Amino acid sequence: MKSLRTIAITLLVGAASALPKLLQQPLSDVAIRIGKEKGVGHFSEWSRATKKEFLIDWQAGRESEWAIVQGNEGGDLDSMTAALTWAYHLEHSTQNTSNQLKAIALLQTPKDGLDLRPENKLALHNSQMTSGHEDVLTQDELPEDPETLAPKLRGIVLVDHAEPLRKWKKAKILSIFDHHVDRGAGPDAEPRIFEKTASCTTIVARTMLDELEKLPEEYHMPHELLELILSAIAIDSNGLDPDDATDTDIYTSQRVLKRSNWANRTLSDVMEHLDDSLSDAKKDLDALGLRDLLRRDWKGDLVDTPSPRTPTVSLGFASVPYSMDEQIAKTEFEELFDWFAIHAAWTAQIGVDISIVLSKYKTKDKDGQKNKIREVVLTVRDDVRIDQEQADSLFKTVKEALEKEKDLGLRPWHRVQELAPRQMVWTHESGAGRKIIRPIVEDAVLAWD
């Protein structure tokens, strides 16, 4: 039998002898062999080139030439697509003018968090982008802290986001496109559009097409981007379901479809197919552990309070498509204590004082009818910015604010007696998600003293 040392030498020699042959192959073939597939098409090439140019200009101190288009930190397909779309439009629509803009989309999630949304991964793959998300700029690839970078920029554009995160507050807000509640940010932004649509990408795409069609000469619109736009609208509107889609979603989708490679197909066929495939991917989360489920759709920021002792607290929201019982089953010990231990480790890592986890799932009654159930988990820490007395007070304030909202119909969870201090779990069937619960919690924190 050969010794381990002999086997190791044989393997090294074999690898070394194969290396020259590998290096003689085209780079694209090498990329595929090592698990990286280089993107093809104009959209991928533009995105990669823009990212490179931005980093070069940062190194040379030319940040003031750039606008950063950013969505929310949840990083869903709508937010990502809206940012990429408007960045592409800003650069191309001004390229032959005296006021040319340099613009780049920023995904406010870490690179290793993008694959926690399988629908994003599928949509980018379908758009022929480079694997591993190398074409896009992510939060952890920023070469400078946002608080110091923000005032150096030409400005920022908010998409699918009503106001900038605290770390971007020093940046000039150039434009806002959102389908949520107007929070009053960027009053001088232009355009500044708040409109009820299923998808924020709808608002961005409509504005892009309106401006594009007014140009003396239209710039090239890559079909990969058009198809990415349709994907984002499809998944947010359930395939343009009449109960979810607005007239604006439908009309804008039709305009985009006419320019895409799918122009010979019907709108309903395209959108239903996209929704089916992307929704199937979105549900493919069984392999994710609890920590990844908490961080895959996390949104949070610093909130100012009237308290002179604690002027600022960190507030975060997670959305998880599993019941608490199912989440507990995903922990190592499959016990309640382990859920809170993993949650505590995650919130400690990101420095959160108060956390809300919103869960949703479906059950069947005895007649086979599906019921949508939601859960709300509230926790407050006393080891980040606030002490135990303050944490107790803040927990009570937020708990009372949520329970006072009769429209939510919150009921104590079936294992509520097992919870520790400053932990609470409710169930409800109101259908209220983060868009409704977040303002309630934020207002309570703002009023806490």
Image (spheres, rainbow, N blue to C red):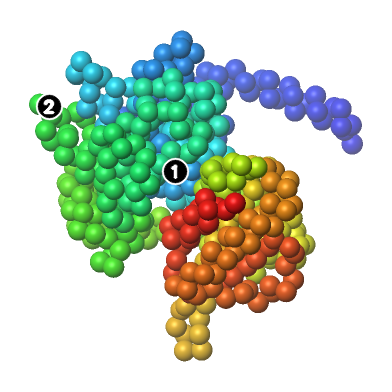
Q: Is residue 112 above or below residue 365?
A: above
Q: Residue furthest bottom?
A: 367
* Distance of label 1 from label 2 (alpha carbons): 33 Å
Q: Which residue is mark 1?
A: 72
Residue 59 percent across, percent down from the top left = 49, 13
* Closer mark to the observer between disc 1 and disc 2: 1
Residue 107 percent across, percent down from the top left = 46, 37
Tell me the residue at 58%/57% (across/down): 356
Q: Which sits in the foreground, 100 or 25?
A: 100
Q: SS at mark 2?
A: loop
Q: Quadrant of residue 173?
A: top left
Q: Which sits in the foreground, 119 or 333?
A: 333
Residue 381 percent across, percent down from the top left = 69, 51
Q: Is residue 429 above or below residue 3?
A: below
Q: What amino acid is labelled 1 in the image?
A: Asn
Q: Could you say which disc has been placed on residue 217 in the image?
A: 2
Q: Quadrant of residue 63?
A: top left
Tell me the residue at 57%/76% (across/down): 411
Which quadrant is home to the N terminus?
top right
Note whether residue 440 is visible. Answer: yes
Tell me the residue at 52%/23% (across/down): 148
Q: Is residue 193 above or below residue 332?
A: above
Q: Which sits in the foreground, 351 or 18?
A: 351
Q: What amino acid is labelled 2 in the image?
A: Glu
Q: Quadrant of residue 223?
A: top left
Neighbourhood count class around disc 2 (C-alpha, 10 Å): few under 14, some 14–19, many 20 upward: few
Q: SS at mark 1?
A: loop
Q: Is residue 83 above or below residue 374?
A: above
